[in-house]
Structure formats: C-alpha cells, structure tokens
Image (cartoon, rainbow, N blue to C red):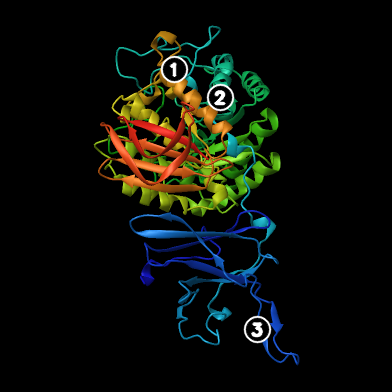
Amino acid sequence: MNKHALLHKSKSEMAYAYDSDTLHIWLRTAKDDFNSIKLVYGDPFRYEPIDEAQTKWVWKHENANDLMMDKRFSDSEYDYYFSAIKPEHKRIKYAFILDDAYLYGVREIYDLTHDIDQKKRYNLFNYFNFPYLNEADIIRIPKWVKDTIWYEIFPERFKRSGNANNKPTHPWGIPAEKVTNHMFFGGNLEGIIESLDYLVDLGITGIYFTPIFKAPSSHKYDTTDYKMIDPAFGTNADFKRLVDESHKRGIKVVLDAVFNHCGYDHPFFQDVIKHGKNSKYYNSFFIKSEPMLNFDLTSDGKPVYHRGLISNYHTFAFTPYMPKWNTEDPLARAHLLDVARYWIEEYDIDGWRLDVSNEVSHDFWRAFKQTVKQAKPDAFIFGENWDYSFPWLGGDQIDTVMNYELIYLIWQFFGFDVNIPRITAGELVRMTNKLLVSYPQQITENMFNLVDSHDTARILHRCKENTRLAFLTYLFMFSFPGTPTIYYGGEIGMTGDHDPDNRRCMIWDENHQNHKFKAQIKQLIRWRKSMDAFGSSDFRWIHHDDSKNVIVYEKRGSKNLMFMINNAPETNTIHLPQAVYGYDIESQKRVQNNIFTLIPYSYLIIQLD
C-alpha cells in the first residue's frame, strides 16, 4: 500500500454538496493498490443501545453493508474513486475501508485485520467530518448555462454594417501588411444584429462579447467610460436593441468586465494625473512613487512606451496605458459595482466575463457577485483564470472560469507549437483525470470550454492548417464536461497566429469560407444538443495507445456514447478488450465489433445499446 498516494480532503473539491440532498465524495489512491474501496458513513450523533438495559451504546452508521465506491478514473499513477450519497440528516462522519483490511481516516490508517471487536473500524475520532449540508453553501450556477453553446465575438472585427457611420483605417478583409491592434476595420453593433440569424442557424445560444465600452484601442480593454458604448460600435440604444433581438432568438448576452484596470484616459486616472495626491481618486489606483509619469508623452498627451519601461504606478502587465484599479478603495469599488448593476438593470444582459479575474481581490469579487445576483439572480459570472481556480469557485465569488486548463491539454495532445511540449495519449488521460477531480461536479458541468480565443493563436493555426486535425479538437472539447465555445470564424476555418493576427476580419464572402468544416461544426452542435451523454459529466476512459496516439472514452447518459479518436497522420487499428454493440451516429450503420480501423485524424462515435 502506497500511503503517500492516498488523498482525501473534507469540505473541499473532494467532498462537497452537489445539491440539497447529495454529497459527492472522492478518494485518490495509487494505481492498482486496492481491489475495492468502501465508504462507511453515518450521523455523528446517532448512537443506539445494543442491550435491554441500555448500558452499551454503539454508533449507528447509515450503510450497514458499507457502500462500494466506483472507480471512476484510472491512469498511470492513480485511481480515483467516487460516491454520491444522500445523508439522512444532512451531516455525516465517514471513512474509507480499503480491501476490507484498512481504514483510511482523517488522522491515521488503521489496520483492521485484527480488529475483532471493531473498535477501530467505528472509532469516529478518526473519521472525516462533513458537519452539515447547508443550503446557503451549495454552489449553484444558473440552470440555463449548462446547455449553452457559446460564440465569442470581437466586435471590431466581426461585421461592418452597410449603414455604419464610423471611419475605419482599413477596408474590410485581410490587409496587405500584418494585422495589428492599431488597425480599425469598422465592425459595429448593427453588423452583429444583422448576423444574429446566422448565429441561430449555426446553433448558438450564448454570445460573449469582448469589451464594447468607450476606449481608444481596437480591443477596448483600455476603458475610458464604462457606461457608454464606444461610438465606433454604435450607441447605447443600439446595444439595447442587440440584447432584445438576441433574447428574441433565445441567445443570452454576456459582456466583458474589465475591472482589474482601466484606460489611461479614464476620468478618475486623469484627475490623479492633474491633481496628484490632492485628487480624491488618488487611492483608487496604486501609485508607487513620484513623479507618477516616468515616461515621455506624445503630442496628444499619451504615454510613449518603450521596452523595459516599468511605470511608477501598477498596471496591467507593464503597459502604462492600463492603470490598475485599487478595488478596495471605496470610490473605485462603488464605481465598478455600479457599472456591474447598470448593464443588467438597464439593458438586461445575462452575465459578465471577468477580465484578469485572478489579479483582483477575492473580497471585491464577493461584493461583485452579491451585486450582480441581487440585480439578476440567474446572471452568469465566469472569470479569465488561466490556472487552477478553486480558490475563486467556492460559490461566493465566480460561478466558473474559462477552462484554460483544458485548452492546454488540447493544445499539447492535438496541436503543434514549438513552445508547448506535446503529450502522449497516456499523459492526456492522466492530466484529464486530474482536471476532472479538481472541481465540484456542478462547476465542471458549467465550465467555459474553448479551443482558442482572442488571446491565443487560432486552433487551425496550431494544427498546421489541417482541418481534419482541427475538427478533432472541437470534437474533444464539445464532448468534454462543460459548455463549448466557438471563437468567431472558427466554424468556417479561419486561421491566425497569436494576438493580434488571431483578430482578423470575419470572412463573410461564402467563396472563401470552408463550408465542409462549417457543416461539421453544425452537426457537432446538433449532436451536443440532442444527446445528453455528449455533454455529460460522467466521463470514462476506455482505452489509449501511446504508440498509435489513439484515445477511446465513454460518456454516460440516457444512451451512452463511445468516442474513438485517431490523432495520428496514419491509419490505425484499435483493439478493444470487449466487443462494442451499437450504431455509428454519423453513418447510422450498425456496429458489433471489438476491432476498429480509423484513417488519419479521424473519429468514430458509437451510440451504445
């Protein structure tokens, strides 16, 4: 027995309330260390007499025969066991029985082989504790989120209406020179409204917009006025119409909350530049030293940035154009929370995506969530966290995050990037297992999954422009627990290197769209919507082969699905230990075999009998 591999934590991602009645319990062990794991549990206060005189009392556990745990995941290092239980009185003490020989508890591992009177087996001193399943502590995410198909729009590059009044610097399309963030192509809200039926036809039910508030840049992450739609995009009235038209079509609308920092031109920061320590907004930012502006200015008063500059105030990254908010300052906090409330109450948006959410204080996000949920209880809040995020996901701050932990695995297994090490099929299994047990199930089910975004190279570029390979990344993402996302143009085979090349103009000329790829994406969306197993959180690895780079996994639902993926440039044959019975959901042909041959970069999805 490898004691060091045993891991369980009470009141954590390994023991949590899934709903009002159900607790989820996870245990990690070394691979193949045990043949069976049982869970013994019961109310910590329930003792009953075992003699008529009632002089001898013993603890009454709820599962008299102990509960056999399900080995949900297994990889080269660990086995992960799972149980969902419904405690009669919403509180339990519990422990794990390992091969009927050992008890793993909160303090020690007891050898039970000589525990004839069972004093060790039922000694609650060594039991884990879930004190009470409190309704207020349950992590609840709006019900509509789980079934959403997201579409991310970078407004400046999505569509330019024929009635646009803004003045672009470049005509729509791909310029002769490289795309930069200083180019303006004239995308606007009217163009998006005109394209809503296109999104409906695609199957989209939720839009995430990168920033649309007044700002000097094309990307708008340098906000000047949080309550004003950037004039290049349109007016506040245009946005209200966009929300209304989206809702008529069953599409939710989420905006980007850039509350870690603002733009250099924001009135609060300009007041600090003008009045220094005498500004009432001085503490709304992090001024490190004087002179505050330790850089040259352009003729129109803007910072001149040079490599290596570290300004005398904290910023996003090291850019002087984006001073960092002090969200603990009462004036800054009141301003930002008012913005969060304003766009919900006045324009009926459905939620917020939080930019650089991991750099903002937990205290502010708690106040933010209270503000948003009071304005709209079923509003969705998800953060831009690129790493392990459980500290933000306890139910009091953020609902979920952009699942960059998943995207890393997708890039490493399917993609080609000299800066990102590739992983084998076995490593994908191991790292995916770790991810799937990192968060409570209700969070995993609602993660904002993606294969690329406005901050990354497009997935087709990572896949060396191979659409067959790129489609496998979408297939894996769509069949993974969480909500799938398409970055605008991904469905028609748009490509591009890292920011800003990934922000090219949307291709509307049908002669330059990849219609075959688009049809595949539409089919993928239909499968996701019509088969509950597609998005199920009950994910099981069946087979993998490092030498062939193939993976096989099962998703369980009302009708289980088996996914086979050949992530290799050559044809591969998969030998499964048992025959598979069902039908190919694409060809509708009957399947009854344990040997399957897949051509390069291909897949097979079988609905099991």
Task: Classify mark 3: helix, strand or loop.
Answer: strand
Residue 31, position as x, y percentages in the image: 36, 62
Residue 196, position as x, y percentages in the image: 58, 18
Q: Residue at the location (38% across, 60% down)?
A: 78
Q: Outermost residue toward the right?
A: 53
| Labelled disc at residue 473 | none
Residue 375 in view: yes
Cα–Cα gap, marks 1 and 2: 18 Å
Dot 1 or dot 2: first in sequence order is: 2
Judging depth in this view, the residue of 386 and 564 nearest the camera is 564
Task: Classify mark 2: helix, strand or loop.
Answer: loop
Q: For mark 1, what is the residue?
A: 506
Dot 3 or dot 1: first in sequence order is: 3
Residue type highlighted by circle 2: Gly
Q: For mark 3, what is the residue?
A: 58
Q: Residue at the location (58% across, 21% down)?
A: 200
What is the quadrant of residue 394 in the picture?
A: bottom right
Q: Residue at the location (42% across, 48% down)?
A: 541
Residue 217, position as x, y percentages in the image: 44, 24
Task: Classify mark 1: helix, strand or loop.
Answer: loop
What is the quadrant of residue 66 in the picture?
A: bottom right
Label 1 crowd (10 A; few <14 / some 14-19 / many >=20): many
Q: For mark 2, what is the residue?
A: 203
Label 3 crowd (10 A; few <14 / some 14-19 / many >=20): few
**Image height of 348 relative to 12, above or below:** above
Asked whether the residues under the numbered discs 3 and 2 touch, taking CB atoms below 8 Å apart as contact, a structural biologist would say no
